[in-house]
Image (cartoon, helix red, strand yellow):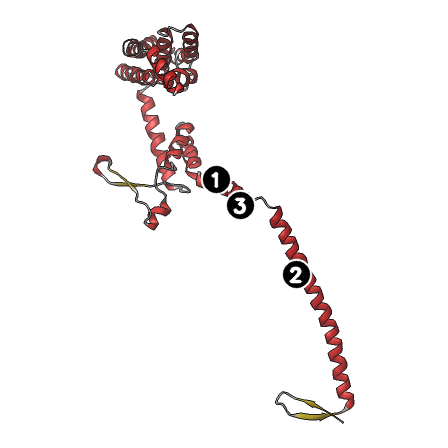
Amino acid sequence: MQRRSVADGSSQSVEPEVLYGDLAGIACIGEHGYADLQAQHLKSVLVKRACDDDSQGMDENGPTISKVLMKTAFAHLPVFIAWSGMKQFGGSPVLGIALGLMLINPLLPSQDDVAKGVAEAITFYPFGIPWKIMNYQGSVLPALVVAIIGAKTERGLKRVVPDAGGTIAQATAALVTGFKMRDPKKRGFYMSASLPAFMGITEPAIFGVNLRFGRPFLFALCGGAAAGFAGALLGAASTGMGVAAIPGIVTYLYSAEAIRNYFIIHGVGMLVSGLLCWFFFDPNKAEAELEAKKAE
């Protein structure tokens, strides 16, 4: 007869066979439990080592790159919405991109900062009505509204201001600017940049000449406005859109009056922009000022 302790501190008598059976069971459980403990410990060591290896091999800029990949499209969502909206409602998609970029300009206070009280919204008073302006990153509705208004406005202006008049004015401003240059190389460069504009491709004239100096671009805008005003007075209308300057004559071939209007519109645009550039702009002086700024 053997005695063993129980939970209350007392002891009780047990048969030898029972005691030996309990000890054998404990030994069996202990053996298996120790094996499981070893397996679990080994597993935790291996997992920790793998994690350490991954953390050591990970680039410290990895999280930043991940944010760029995941958040860029969302942050610039107004740009895509404005682009798609302008295209859908009949406007120029590139203008939609410009409008969308304005909505997320970093100069505007973010909505989070305004909500937290860290920054204040910019207050604008068109027609005496206060408007709160903020950065609209990730927003959909403001970009859609801007796209609709922009498309409707552009389509309305195109009915009054023909594309051809503005294009021919930009070409004339670049041509006159080049003609007044004393440097033969620059004269040839600026005048050659105006030639594609007479065929409807204005990028070389605008970005290579007119915007470089600023004033010729403004004078060309004046010429385009005068051409549009003349077209409105004449009631001119073309049979298509997108064909400008000299090739644009094909959209006025439907009548003799329309052809006459075409030449009047272009003549006004060329005359206004050309005279303004001739009398109120000296490209040689402007070129010298640009060179002096570069030297600084």
Is residue 30 placed above or below 74 in the rendered structure?
Answer: below
Q: Which mark sits nearer the N-terminus, 2 or 1? A: 2
Q: Which of marks 2 and 3 is nearer the N terminus?
A: 2
Density class for disc 3 (Cα within 10 Å; few <14, some 14-19, many ≥20) is: few
User: In this orientation, which residue lies closer to the viewer: 90 or 197?
Assistant: 197
Q: Is residue 238 visible?
A: no
* Along the viewing direction, whichever of 90 and 133 lies nearer the viewer: 133
State the image quarter where residue 36 is shown: bottom right
Q: Which amino acid does label 1 sit on?
A: Thr
Residue carrying label 2: 44
Report whether 144 appears left or right of 31: left
Report helix, strand or loop for mark 3.
helix
Residue 238: which numbered mark, if any?
none
Residue type at mark 3?
Answer: Pro
**Residue that carries the numbered disc 3 in the rendered image:** 63
Q: What element carries label 1?
A: helix
Mark 3 and mark 1 lie on one chain; the one further toward the N terminus is 3
Residue pictured at 63% horizontal, 90% vertical:
9
Query: Relative to 178, does residue 16 appear above or below in the rendering?
Result: below
Q: Name the residue under label 1.
A: 72
- C-alpha separation, residue under disc 3 versus residue under disc 1: 14 Å
Above or below, 40 relative to 242? below
Q: Work out whether residue 106 or residue 97 is closer to the camera in this orientation and state it.
A: 106
Q: Tell me residue 25's x, y (percent).
A: 75, 80
Question: Could you tell me how far apart the alpha carbons at marks 2 and 3 are, in whole angstroms?
Answer: 26 Å
Q: Quadrant of the N terminus?
A: bottom right
Local SS, label 2: helix
Q: In this view, does 221 lie to the left or right of 84?
A: left
Position of 137 relative to 10 (above/below): above
Q: Which of the 4 image quadrants contains residue 216?
A: top left
Category of crowding for the residue at label 1, using alpha-carbon neighbours closer than 10 angstroms: few (below 14), some (14–19), many (at least 20): few
- The crowd level at tag 2 (other Cα within 10 Å; few <14, some 14-19, many 20+) is few
